[in-house]
Amino acid sequence: MSQAIILDGRPVAAAIRSAVRERVDTLRRRGVQPRCAVVLMENDEPGRLYTQQIARQAADLGIAIDVRIVSAKASTADLVAAVAAAVDDPAVHAILVQRPLPPGLDAARISEEIDPRKDVDGAHPYNQGLLMAGESFCVPATAAAVMELLHQPQVPALDGARAAVVGRSAVVGRPVALLLTAANATVTICHSHTRNLEAVVREAEIVVAAVGRPRFVGSAMVRPGATVIDVGTNWVDGRFVGDVDFDAVAAVAGVMTPVPGGVGPVTTAVLLRSIVDLTERGG
C-alpha cells in the first residue's frame, strides 16, 4: 500500500480555469475575445489530440482556438509562413506551434518567427532569454504546470531544497530547472551522460521526471519522503504511464503526481491562463 500523498492535478487545474473564466468574462464585456492560433502538422496525432483537449476547455471558458493545419510534407518555409500569418492577424493574441516538429524542419527558425508578445509557450529565443534572466514573460506551459504543483500546500517549501530534474529538453527540463532556481532550490539537471545517475537523483528532496522513458525512475532513485513530479506521458500496453514507476515509488516518496491526472490537466489550464495573460497585455 502506498504511503505517498498523491497530488491530483485536476482540482489544481479547476481552480486555475475558474480564475481564467472570470478574466475572460471581463475581457468579453470589453468586446475582446482571447484567441490563440495553433499551428499543427496534419500527421501529428498526439498534437491533434492535445489541440482538441485545449479547444474543448477553451470553448467552455470563452477562449477561441484557431487551428491552422499545415501539410505533412510542409517545409520549414511553409511553417514560417503559417506562423507569420498568425503574427500578422490582429485578432490573434497568442500563437502555439505544436512540438516536437518532424526531423528535417528547422524548429529554431520556426520559433524565431513567433512574435515574442504572442509567444504563449515561451518558444522564442527572446522569451527563453528572459527566463534565463529570471524575468520570464511566458514560459512553456508544462514547466509552469510543474511549478504550480510544487507550490501546492502538500509540498514542502522549495526554498533551500535540493532538486533533481531528470531530462534537459528546452520544453520541460531546462525551463523547470530555471524556475526551480528562481524559487531558491539547489538544482541538478540529470541526463543520459550523468555519472552515477541513481545516486545523484536519490540525494534530491524534489525529483522532476521529464526524460520520456516509461517507468524510468524507480524506487532506488528516490530518497524516502521526496516529492516526485512525473511529467512523462508514454503510451504502453494501451494506456498512458509516466516516467516514474508509480507503484514502486509511491512506497517511498512523500508526495507524488499520478499519470494521467497529474501534470497534464494543469498544463492545459496554465496554457489557457497564458492566452488570457497575452490578451490582457495586448488588448
Image (cartoon, rainbow, N blue to C red):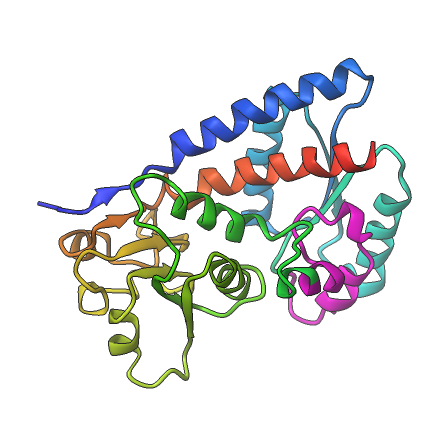
x, y (%) of residue 5? 22, 42
For residue 86, side relative to residue 46 (left or right): right
116 magenta-colored: yes
For residue 72, side relative to residue 88 (left or right): left
The quarter in which the N terminus is drawn is top left
Q: Residue at x 36, y 54 (%)?
A: 230
For residue 138, side relative to residue 254 (left or right): right
For residue 125, side relative to residue 231 (left or right): right
x, y (%) of residue 30? 81, 17
The quarter in which the C terminus is drawn is top right
Nearer-the-camera pick, 89 or 222: 222
Q: Give the range drawn in magenta.
A: 101-129
Residue 254, above or below 63 = below
Q: Which residue is drawn at 39% across and 29% down?
A: 11
x, y (%) of residue 231? 41, 54
Nearer-the-camera pick, 6 or 88: 6
192 magenta-colored: no
Q: Which residue is drawn at 77% across and 24% down?
A: 33
Answer yes or no: is residue 125 visible: yes
Nearer-the-camera pick, 211 or 280: 280
Q: In which quarter of the image is residue 81?
A: bottom right
Answer yes or no: is residue 214 visible: no
x, y (%) of residue 273? 61, 35
